[in-house]
Amino acid sequence: MSLPAWAAALAAAGVPAVQLREKDLGDRACFEMLRLLRAALPASRLFANGRADIAVAAGADGVHLPADGVPTAALRARFGRELLLGRSTHTVDEVEREAASGADYVTFGPVFATPGKGAPVGLGALADAASHGVPVLALGGVGLAELPRVAAAGAAGAAGIRLFQDLERLSDVVAAARVAFT
């Protein structure tokens, strides 16, 4: 499926936020993809992966930083509140640090078993992470059935790839997430 068709499906389903997670994409190609996504997803928040400069240039709403990326506090000092800043986290200590550094949200996980992501942290760790004053998005092994469980643990939402891949179920996934997280 082409990127424009995929973006149209995401927009039609009402996906609230999209991260372009193409780690090996060249700068110009990343910029162009973000511009295409920005045009196709005007009602969704759009995030670049790891590159604040490209996010700003392309009109994205924010940047999602890897665990070992540029410090959140440095980007917050440079961009203020005009750029949303998110960070991948895997421990409660990392969540605490990001809350203190001014992150707008964090992803946390893997909460459940998922291929290639290490041992799951579980719902108890998710609940602990969610108690530190920054919105936490549950990540890793989160499927439709797990949405109410991660919401009950205090997650502000869920992030994922496989969760949002099946375009035929996409509207159902978004509807279930809206119910779980409101």
Image: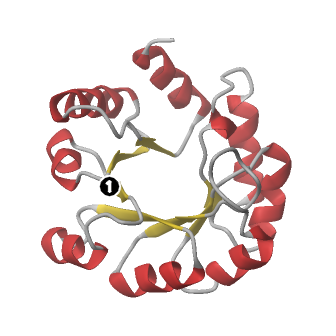
Say what amino acid the circle numbered 1 marks. Answer: Val
| Residue 89 seen in render | yes
Judged left or right of residue 50, residue 26 is left
Give coordinates of residue 138: x percent, y percent: 65, 61
Based on the displayed image, in which of its 4 quarters is residue 155 positioned? Answer: bottom right
- Measured as percent of width and height from the top left, residue 181 is found at 71, 60
In front of the other: 66 or 127? 66
Residue at the limit of the structure toward the top, as seen here: 1
Picture layout, residue 4 above or below residue 114: above
Residue wearing tag 1: 63
Q: Is residue 103 above or below residue 88?
A: below
Residue plotted at (82% across, 59% down): 148
Q: Give the residue drawn at x 21%, y 32%.
A: 26
Horizontal side of residue 14 vs 49, given as left or right: right
Is 162 left, or right, of 49 in this rendering? right
Label 1 sits on a secondary structure element that is: strand
Asked whether, in this view, residue 162 is left or right of residue 169, the answer is: left
Q: Position of residue 10 (x, y in %)?
A: 54, 29
At 49% from the left and 79% from the top, the residue drawn is 94
What residue sits 75% from the left and 65% below the top?
Answer: 151
Q: How is the image coloured?
A: secondary structure
What x and y, as percent, mark residue 114? Answer: 71, 48
Q: Quadrant of the C terminus?
A: bottom right
